[in-house]
Amino acid sequence: MDPVIAFIIAKYNYWMYIILMMIGLCGMIIKKNLIKKIIGMNIFQTAIILFYISIAAKKNATIPIIAHAHGDGHAAVNAAGIINPLPHVLMLTAIVVAVATLGVALALAIKIYRQYHTLEEDEIISQIRE
Amino acid sequence: MATIYSIKPLLAVIVSLLLIPVLISSRTPNIREGWTFAIALAKFLIVASMVPAVLLGNQIVFTVAEIIPGLAIRFKVDALGILFALVASLLWIVTSAYSIGYMRGLKEHSQTRYFCFFALALSATIGVAFSANLLTLYLFYEMLSFATYPLVTHHQDREARSSGRKYLLYIVGPSIGLVLPAMLICYHLTGTLEFTPRGFLAGAASPLMTAVLLFMFIFGFAKAAIMPMHAWLPAAMVAPTPVSALLHAVAVVKVGVFSIARVMTGVFGVDLLAGLHLGTIVCYIAGFTVIVASLMAISQDGLKRRLAFSTIGQLSYIVLGVALLSPKGMTGGLVHIAMHAFGKITLFFCAGAIFVATGKKYISEMTGIGKRMPVTMVAFFIGSLSVIGLPPTGGFFSKWYLVLGTLESGQTTMLIILLTSSLLNAAYFLPIVYHAFFCSPEKAMFGDDIQEAPLWCVVPPVITAAGSVFLFFYPTLFVRLAELAIGL
Amino acid sequence: MNSHFPALIIVVPLLSAFVIVMAGWLNKKYCFPLAAAALGSSLVSAVAMLSRVMDSGPFTYHLGGWAPPWGIEYRVDHLNALVLVVVAAVAFINLIATRAIVRADFPEKTGSFYGLYSLFATGLLGVVVTGDAFNLFVLLEITALTGYALIGIGKQHAPLASLNYIFMGTIGASFYLLGVGYLYLATGTLNMADLALHLSKISGSTVVLAAFLICLTGLYMKMALFPLHAWLPNAYACAPSAAAGIIAPLTTKVMVYVLIRITLFVFTPAFTYAHLPLNQAMIWLASLAIVMGSILALSQKSLKKILVYIIVAEVGYMVGGLWIGNRISISGSILHIVNDAAMTLCVFLAAAGLQFKLKGDSFIALRGSFRKMPYTMAALVVGGLSIIGVPPTCGFFSKWYLISGALTAGTYQFVVALLLNSLVNVVLFFRIFEIGYFEPFPGQDSHRGQKAQAINEAPLSMVAMLLLVSAGLIALGLFSSDMVTRIILPSIPAGIL
């Protein structure tokens, strides 16, 4: 039992993102309210962003900013003591994408509301079937 | 046996395609029909100009383009191809004349569309005739299927719609579902699709695979109307009669049997088929069709339907002849392509002329018509003699060779089938002629107001009937071409 | 100038999108010429790049001058260049063809529409030209977002359809991003060529396999492979005609391109084809997609819905061709990207024209259409024959290669699925043709004696483009051998038999 628990605790970041992802996915599939679905989608995307950030972290490492470095910024750096900045940078883009998707989704939800006067998926479908 | 490289095959195929825009833009019907004649004549002359070279044993080849690495659209004019092309292009001239009379006589609609698709269909027919490999043949075969659909469904009414569906189902279905995979399997097994004198499939496939491929081709080329792939042909009789005449007596159906003959000789080869006894099996299948079709013809009251079932039977004669795998038998089968064409087209022309003049479609309503339309019915009589196979018509020769072929290859069952079917042919044709001419005045159904159809509708059957008789006295051209085709 | 085409091909439409939107505030008439100029220049760049690749082989371009693997690299090889030409050409032709439709449908939103259109084209072109896995994600999302917007401005159920598309599309893109994350985790690089090098050394690891499967799932969702196709029918059918003309032919095909890029060039054939059960399962899935697409299409009652399910089936062609794994079938798959884009463009433009003039595309609205719109229907006939697979149109040739490849590999279920699909397509298209040909349109008693006054054709720009594309279908067919030998076969990696 102990090795299993140790295994789970050691990889806790992966478990966290998987749980978040599943919550988001379940929300998107199970919930009937369009806004809840959109929130589920956002949680889903956030989980992946968290995953990327988590793989950038290192033990006993500091943030990737070199103080007083202009002019002679070519000094060698101890890479092991600095967390990986690349995933953070990539995720900036991914966050922008997620926000843009959220924006488009909400705009469409507004348009749907204006058209069907409800945000519940089953009610909308029954309106369409008529 | 030299190979000549010349653009003539391509010209023969596309001359009618190129002139379709001219047809569309013709300002008056007379100009349009004049151009149709000109195109038909040009096509025939190009084809005829290649005959002397082929008679000397040469082939004329033209490669259009390589469309798959290793496979090209290629034309090869040899004896078999030119036999068929000659018949088709010659009869198109006559049919154009007939179409004019028929379409104008009935004031049909959309005549420009009709003539354009007719030109397209003839291009495809000559394309099939001159194909050098299976891919080219398949290409033009499909082109013909789709080009003839608007012609079959010309009247655009309910009947045309359901007949059009049958047409597609029976013709396009098997060609996509059977011929295409068979062609691909052949290519996969041997790496080539070119028709070669002794076939190219020998040794490449197991006997079972070879048999399966053969049956896929025979039933896949459903234009040959081998049973059970025959049901489209009677349904296609809703088309205007010139369509039935040229396409379903000459072009479309002969494309089907021509393709089967081509595949049997050029892909499989006589030796392979004989070695696996596949020829005998095909003989039985064709023989079955012959008998059943002839029996069904007797029960039909619609004249065109009776002719359609007669065609189904006659087409299987051709396949039977080729499947006999003996020189005389194969010659007979191939010569029958020409003889049957002349005879059948005469019969269809007469049926159409009767419809134009009297509006009658059913045989039971045609008693006593001989007195009013003597020329038409005499032509009908000659045409039926040719189909039955009696002298002095060309059909006698092909039947004669077929009979000799069955004796040559020892297939006595086939001999019995041939003779029985000839009797059946007589049984369903001669009564028509008899009741047309010899009936008591009370039973005659036509008053003095009925007379011969317009000249455009009467002269063509006379020409083709005369052609049938001419072929009795001078069959040498077609016999020689057929003999060259099978390698004698 | 010559060497900057890889960047220009996306920068020009990207910047023009903003210019178009601003110009739209000034005067709506400026939008179309600007968009046409932008996409025209992309087409020119694409063609220039293709000829350069055909002459001197693949070349690379470093964005901003930064060398890979730190900088983003654009790598143009035969596969890329071909798909770029296809995307640029389809975008350009559709733009011109739907000019009148946009003017009629979106009189006030012309600037926004053309802006979104340019951005959509940018995204697609970028996805094809890039050589960096994360850059691909970014451009993928640009494509997706503009696509959602373009679909969402349609009528009726379009907003709902678009929202459902957002949900599934986001899951798909996120899975792809996750897969790339795993790859980065395992190798430390995002550059595709670099990834291939590193992955070949660690191909036994579970991380790589997990990344592979997750990426595949994400891409399958984006390309609507059955059973992950549920978003496509509604989204494409409800989209406005002008947008459907670019979204339908291109999105799924570009996703197939990405699939080929990832499986053959990042994960390398040695890894991709090493797991036999997976390959077999994929081929069965593809065959199922083809069959189900055909069956679902049979029950539809409107032209666009039928065409949309045909797209679902066509995706199965390309995926199956890839997984069969020999040179011929992969050539067939790549050739089908080109052919299917062209065929889908042809039929969707025809459907757009029909819907525009006949005010609907249900079976009832299409009655007598051969009489009323002969040129549009002629183009639909050519497109239909191509989808059925009749030579000499292009559809026949991709089928030929796919079936040949399947016969060589012994995957007969794929052959059966392809032939079945052809036969079902005959039924589907001839049902439409029958309605257009046999049924008299309202006001006509019978077919006798009708004159040419009944003709009420689509606008000239539409008809001209339709005829161009129809002729293109036949030309593509006749030149397919050239394309295969000179462009497609060289693009397939050497390790495949």
Image (cartoon, coloured by chain):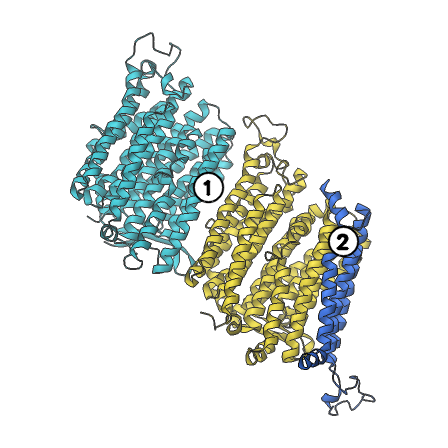
Mark 2 burial class by Cα count in 10 Å: few <14, some 14-19, many 20+:
some
Element carrying mark 2: loop
Nearer to the camera, B289 or A107: B289
Rendered position, C33 above or below C490: above
Residue C444, image x, y percentages: 60, 27
Q: How crowded is mark 1: few (under 14 residues within 10 Å), some or many (20 or more)?
A: some
Q: What residue type is labelled 1?
A: Phe
Query: Who's the residue at 59% across and 58% down the image?
Result: C225
- Cβ atoms at labels 1 and 2 below 8 Å apart: no
Q: Chain A is drawn in which colour?
A: blue
Q: What residue type is labelled 2?
A: Lys
Residue B313 is situated, as x and y percent measured from the top left of the image, at 31, 34
Q: Are marks 1 and 2 on the same chain?
A: no
Vertical position of residue C470 compared to residue B107: above or below: below
**B365 left or right of A13 in image:** left
Q: Nearer the viewer, mark 1 or mark 2?
A: 2
Mark number displayed over residue B146: 1
Rendered residue at 37%/12% (across/down):
B445
Give the letter of the chain under mark 1: B
**Residue indicated by mark 2:** A32
Q: Quadrant of residue B87?
A: top left
Give the color of chain B as drawn: cyan
Q: Is residue B180 left or right of residue B86?
A: right
Residue furthest to the top in view is: B442
Q: For chain C, what colour was chosen?
A: yellow
Position in image of residue C93 (x %, y %):
62, 53
Q: Where is residue C497 in the image (x, y as percent from the top left)?
A: 44, 69
| Residue at mark 2: chain | A
